[in-house]
């Protein structure tokens, strides 16, 4: 089984038709058909079937697709790392992070790795955990630093919690609930701004259901922490954010913790890697710097800084 066979197979699955896939891999359609047939003969399995909506993988094809994506991405990463080392770098490193850690933990670890000697060919991708996990599983990322909220993690992944995050319900300094001992019924009537992720939907449902209340009706969901922080600080909204996000993004005096039940909401953040990933010095160095940055933040928080 050769990489070209896998590239051709993945192209057909991704494109849905032989004609589009042939254009993508720069082959004639008959040549692409022969390549797929050769792969099926080699594996003694039918990998694709034609449906009214196009070519779709069979159950055997679905099993192959995940591994094919991983192998192709690993091959591309290997090529990139060889080129990086050849040009004088220590290696190639692909990092995934949740947005709330761009200026908290990850920035320190990136700066430390890049300052430790030879340059690193480094890329950083910001996203939500569900998206980042997909990229980690198929080999596009080496390591993730993210919150670890209500996510089902399979046996292919290694998870190392390194930091507790304290989240609170926040409002703008002039919000009428500031300084008031609020209950959940009062929070229910407010405009909320929250991250657009399943774990936040589940949290709001469970938070209010514990008191026999429905979830809030007026909720703005977004993938932008900047927008959430701005809506809380100046737009009359309330929302749940870790305290370090509010402190860094809104400045002093623009957002205030509400005296809401169940706060602080403690969540874990940590490092996620792929169990089967080959050991690489540059990845291990970055993970070490993540641990050091998290420990520094923990000590600073414990000292009231």
Image: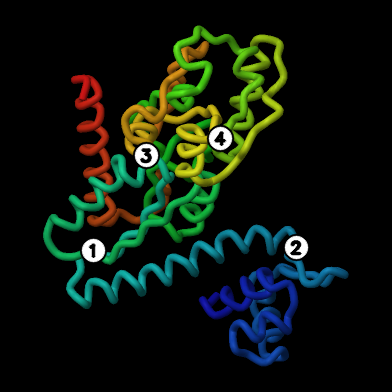
Query: Real-space Cα distance between discs 1 and 3?
Result: 29 Å
Residues under labels 2 and 1: Cα distance? 41 Å
**Dividing the image into 4 quarters, which one contains the C terminus?**
top left
Q: Nearer the viewer, residue 66 or 295?
A: 295
In this view of the protein, which residue sits in the foreground, 89 or 100? Answer: 100
Q: Residue 116 location in percent, x, y? A: 13, 55
Residue at 54% across / 46% down in the picture?
223
Examine the rendering and report whether any part of residue 162 can be seen. no
Q: Is residue 65 left or right of residue 268?
A: right
Dot 1 corresponds to which residue? 120
Name the residue tied to disc 4: 194
User: Horizontal and vertical percent for residue 254?
Assistant: 39, 30
> CA–CA distance between discs 4 and 1?
35 Å
Q: Which mark is residue 58?
A: 2
Vertical side of 247 occupied by 168: above or below: above
Q: Which residue is mark 3?
A: 249
The reply to whether the C-beta atoms of the residues labelled 1 and 3 are less than 8 Å apart is no
């Amino acid at each position: 089984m050769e990489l070209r066979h896998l590239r051709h197979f993945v192209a057909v699955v991704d494109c849905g038709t032989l004609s589009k896939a042939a254009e993508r891999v720069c082959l004639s359609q008959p040549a692409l058909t022969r390549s797929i047939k050769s792969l099926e003969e080699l594996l003694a399995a039918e990998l694709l079937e034609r449906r009214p909506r196009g070519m779709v993988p069979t159950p055997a094809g679905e099993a192959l697709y995940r591994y094919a994506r991983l192998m192709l991405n690993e091959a591309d990463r290997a090529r990139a790392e060889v080129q990086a080392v050849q040009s004088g770098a220590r290696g190639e490193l692909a990092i995934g992070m949740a947005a709330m850690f761009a200026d908290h933990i990850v920035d320190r670890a990136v700066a430390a790795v890049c300052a430790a000697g030879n340059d690193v060919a480094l890329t950083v991708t910001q996203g939500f955990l569900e998206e980042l996990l997909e990229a980690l599983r198929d080999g596009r990322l080496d390591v993730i630093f993210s919150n670890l909220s209500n996510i089902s993690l399979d046996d292919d992944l290694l998870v190392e919690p390194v930091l507790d995050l304290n989240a609170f319900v926040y409002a703008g300094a002039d919000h009428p609930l500031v300084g008031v001992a609020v209950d959940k019924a009062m929070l229910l009537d407010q405009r909320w701004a929250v991250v657009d992720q399943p774990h936040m939907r589940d949290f709001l449902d469970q938070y209010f259901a514990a008191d026999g209340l429905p979830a809030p009706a007026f909720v703005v969901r977004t993938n932008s922490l900047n927008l959430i922080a701005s809506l809380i600080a100046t737009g009359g909204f309330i929302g749940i954010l870790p305290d370090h996000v509010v402190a860094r993004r809104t400045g002093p005096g623009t957002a205030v913790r509400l005296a809401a039940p169940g706060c602080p909401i403690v969540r874990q953040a940590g490092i996620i890697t792929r169990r089967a990933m080959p050991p690489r010095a540059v990845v291990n160095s970055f993970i070490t710097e993540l641990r050091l940055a998290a420990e520094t933040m923990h000590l600073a928080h414990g000292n009231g800084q």
